[in-house]
Image (tube, grey):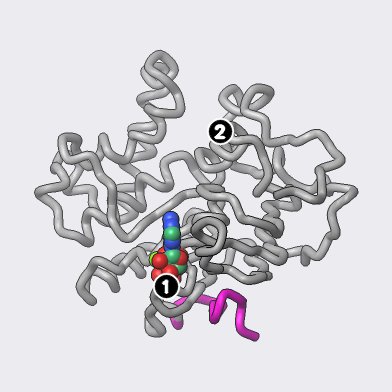
């Protein structure tokens, strides 16, 4: 997978700085920024937060391999709202999963703040997913027995473990309530998912994706399961949060209307970015 080995020690290191790092520093992105990899070709423009070079991904084995991504190059602008649009089956989810280190490319490179991330060790990728990337999917994946507020707190419970979570619980709860207010759900804190509409469930999932103060939100057809009214509310929520929380948003969709609400639209056609 990796033909360009990082020549610098990797700095995304949960052992050395992760859990003990003050939230203010974690969120400032200082720890992951600036230092460049000597051996990697730098094609990164100043404002780009993610950069993808020559990404290939196929599914299947041997003779029945189906190529999905066939050399994708793209840059994601810091603080922008980028939509990646393509037909169903064009590889949008595949691409988003690769950006979020949920899967590995066959070849090519993905950089986050000048740091190559597609070939990091699993623990370092997990750290990135926990601290830098917020992920939203078409389906909300809420736990049915927990309240809205508890669902939003889940990532913190998982990351911290029992004792640290107890210690930090007050501040996490405060932040979770603040996020639920921002997504318009302050009156639904103690509701269970079964008592929420689809739009409310997705807005809960959005609040959950932000509880660890990520810098990038990766959204896979976030309105794909919603009617137009709820879909519009979710889009408004994403747009407002991006500004308020100073986020970079990357959304994949097959819907021209939705994509047109982004600052920038990238078209995925036949496994490459159409120019
Ligand atoms: N885990 C997988 N195993 C085999 N084929 C897959 C897998 N995931 C996706 N595919 C195939 O890859 C293609 C692109 O899928 P996907 O990225 O989900 O497209 P999109 O999100 O644009 O609809 C489709 O033909 C799909 O069937
Ligand atoms: Mg998809």
In the rendered image, residue 106, in percent from the top left (x then y), is placed at 63, 56
Most foreground residue, 259 or 120:
120
How would you rate the neighbour count of disc 1 (Cα within 10 Å): few for under 14, some for 14-19, many for 20 or more? few
Segment colored magenta:
260-275
Q: Which residue is mark 2?
A: 23
As for residue 68 lying within the magenta part, the answer is no
Looking at the picture, tell me which residue is in the foreground, 185 or 251: 251
Q: Nearer the viewer, residue 52 or 256?
A: 52
Does residue 32 appear in this view? yes
Q: Nearer the viewer, mark 2 or mark 1?
A: 1
Q: Image quadrant for the C terminus?
A: bottom right
Between disc 2 and disc 1, whose residue precedes?
2
Q: Residue at x 66, y 44 (%)?
A: 29
Left or right of residue 155, residue 54 in this image: right
- Extreme residue toward the left, this view: 195
Q: Secondary structure at mark 2?
A: helix
Secondary structure found at label 1: loop
Tell whether 230 sits left or right of 109: left
Residue at the front extreme, as displayed: 63
As drawn, the label of residue 89 is: 1
């Amino acid at each position: 997978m990796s033909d360009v080995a990082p020549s610098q020690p990797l700095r995304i290191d949960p052992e050395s700085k992760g859990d003990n790092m003050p939230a203010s520093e974690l969120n400032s992105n200082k720890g992951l920024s600036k230092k460049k990899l000597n051996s990697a070709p730098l094609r990164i423009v100043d404002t780009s937060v993610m950069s993808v070079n020559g990404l290939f991904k196929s599914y299947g084995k041997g003779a029945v391999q189906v190529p999905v991504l066939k050399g994708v190059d793209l840059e994601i602008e810091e603080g922008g709202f980028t939509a990646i649009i393509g037909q169903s089956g064009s590889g949008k989810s595949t691409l988003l999963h690769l950006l979020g280190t949920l899967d590995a490319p066959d070849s090519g490179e993905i950089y986050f703040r000048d740091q190559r991330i597609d070939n990091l060790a699993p623990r370092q990728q997990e750290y990135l997913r926990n601290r830098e990337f917020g992920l939203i999917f078409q389906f909300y994946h809420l736990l049915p027995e927990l309240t809205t507020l508890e669902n939003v707190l889940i990532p913190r419970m998982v990351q911290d473990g029992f004792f640290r979570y107890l210690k930090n619980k007050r501040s996490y709860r405060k932040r979770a309530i603040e996020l639920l207010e921002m997504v318009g759900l302050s009156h639904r804190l103690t509701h269970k998912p079964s008592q929420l509409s689809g739009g409310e469930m997705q807005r809960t999932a959005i609040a959950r994706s932000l509880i660890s103060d990520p810098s990038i939100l990766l959204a896979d057809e976030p309105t794909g399961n919603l009617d137009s009214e709820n879909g519009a509310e979710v889009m408004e929520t994403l747009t407002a949060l991006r500004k308020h929380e100073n986020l970079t948003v990357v959304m994949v969709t097959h819907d021209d209307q939705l994509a047109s609400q982004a600052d920038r639209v990238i078209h995925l056609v036949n496994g490459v970015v159409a120019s």
